[in-house]
Structure formats: structure tokens, C-alpha cells
Image: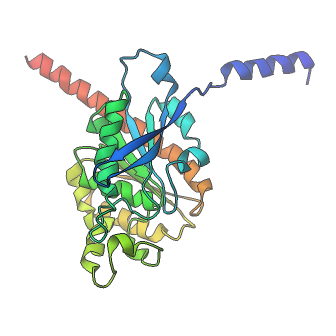
Amino acid sequence: MNPVRAFWLILTLLVTAPAWAYESRVVTIPSAAMHESFEATVVLPDQYARRNTANRFPVIYLLHGSGGDYTDWATNSPIGKLADRYHVILVMPDGGHESWYIDSPVNPRSRYETYVGTEVVAYVDAHFRTLATKEARAITGLSMGGFGALHIALGRPDEFGAAGSISGAVDPRGSEDEPGIEQVFGDPARDAGFWNSEAIVENARSFDDAHIALTIDCGVNDSLVQSNRMLHERLVELGVPHDYAERPGGHTWTYWSNAVQYQVLFFASAFRHARMASTAAGNLTSAAS
């Protein structure tokens, strides 16, 4: 290639390439429910600092999987770029190694549903410029976190307007051999009623009443794909609107770091549609006055 042409090509790429200027912070969030504090990663988009300080932003909560922690998403996926691209705040709380994001009936010290679904949300709304409404709040996660995201969203339909699951362990009854799961769910035989009641597929009808924008995906080579298909089929049977995808891949960060990009796009679209609907409703009210 001609040296002059090469120079101008490189210069053009430098000028047109997006400048990712997001800010990543680690904060400590107290839990009154567990009498303890836990760290969380918060990613703020470039616009948070550069634009009008009165501006407020939608929030997406990303939950880690079994054995993980609050650093997983930031370390293994391009979430910072997603915060900039879609002008959202991303929050990654610590959910414990095997909490399943439930308020355990057998371990009163494990109250991660209350912590993530109530206490973390309240902290983030109090300390950052968020749009503190259901329509501007979404939650998703991978594996155990996928179950947790759907479980928390169903339990708090007034808090989350959108929810997702990536390679989600959506039916804990298929994870009975997971180390530590009995410490939060109880014995699979003795406490079978509770195990059954917590399966997302058994609560699928509730999504219709909750009016939650819903997205679910799983790799075709993932051991959890069958339970995700069952959930999808149940939602279709019930007529519950949702987005469902299977893509090549397994239970790996290669899959998750790709899938999260589709989910954040889905949530950004849901936020936009909610704003448009709210604006339209406001205009109708004004016209009627």
C-alpha cells in the first residue's frame, strides 16, 4: 500500500474509532438483612461525567454465577463499552458463592434476594444519578445469576421493567448436585415443595402479570439448555411475550461475553420504548386537559 494512503487510513481509523471513556468504581454496600457489607462494581458511562450533571440514567444489574463475585463481569466481558454505547449504568453486586440469590428458608444469614433486589437498588438510586423507576431498571445474570435475575424480577414486579437470563440455571431441581445448594434450598427430598415452588418454569405465568420485558438465551452445547427450552416452551404456551435465543457455545465466558451484548441491546430498546410510551401518554393527558 502507498505510504501516504496508509497514513491517511490510520488517521481516519483513529478519528472515527469510538473513545471508550467509561468509569469503573468499586463501592461497598451495606446489608441490614445480613448485618454485613459487600462490594460491588459500578460502571458509569462516559456521558455520566461529560454531560449535564442533571442527567439521569437507566440501570442494568448484572449477576454473577456460582463461585463468582462482583468482579467477574468487568474482568471477563466488554461491559464498559456497553455502558458507553447505550448510555446506561451497569451494577454488578456480590451475590455470594452459592446463594442462588434467594432468601434461604434454611439459612437465615443468607438473604441475597433482599440484598440485591431491595438494598442494592436503594443504595444505587441514593448514590448515583439513576432514573429510579421500574421502566428504567433491568436485571440479568449468568448461570446461578440467571436464575437469580428472573427470581428477583418476579418477586419485585414494581422494581424491574426488564429481566434476562444467560445460560440460566432456571430450574434448581436440575442442580441438586451443585456443592452448597442444599445449604440455601434445603434437602431436595424433605423440602421438595420449596424446590418446586422456586423453579422459574413453575412461575412462568407470573411474567404475564408482571409486565416485564423478558429475554432468555443459552448455548446449544450448554448442559442447561434443556431446562431453558422447557421454560421457553412454557412461556409460548402461556402466550407470554419474550425474546429467546440459542447460539453456538457452552457454559463459558466466551459465550457469556458475547451474549451480554445482545441482552444490553435488548434492555436499551426496552428503556427507549418505555420512554416513548410514557411521552405519548403524557401528550394524551395534556391534550385532554
User: For the C terminus, which image quadrant?
Assistant: top left
- Farthest left residue? 289
Residue 148, percent across and down? 37, 58
Tell me if residue 31 comes above or below residue 270 in the rendering.
Answer: below
Tell me if residue 243 comes above or below residue 26 in the rendering.
Answer: below
Q: Which residue is nearer to you in this view: 188 or 11?
A: 188
Q: Which residue is nearer to you in this view: 31 or 220?
A: 31
- Farthest front residue? 35
Q: Is 21 positioned to the left or the right of 237 in the image?
A: right
Which of the colour schemes (rainbow, by chain, secondary structure, one colour) is used?
rainbow
Residue 226, percent across and down? 45, 71
Q: Is residue 22 visible?
A: yes
Tell me if residue 103 comes above or below residue 160 in the rendering.
Answer: below
Tell me if residue 195 comes above or below residue 141 in the rendering.
Answer: below
Question: Which image quadrant for residue 27?
Answer: top left
Which residue sits at x=36%, y=65%?
A: 231
User: For the N terminus, which image quadrant?
Assistant: top right
Which residue sits at x=56%, y=44%?
A: 74
Total numbered labels placed on residues in the image: 0
Q: Is 135 positioned to the left or the right of 178 in the image?
A: left
- Farthest right residue? 2
Residue 263, percent across and down? 46, 46
Q: Is 271 positioned to the left or the right of 9 in the image?
A: left
Q: Is residue 273 visible?
A: no
Which residue sits at x=48%, y=74%?
A: 179
Which residue sits at x=27%, y=35%?
A: 133
- Farthest bottom residue? 189
Residue 195, percent across and down? 30, 74
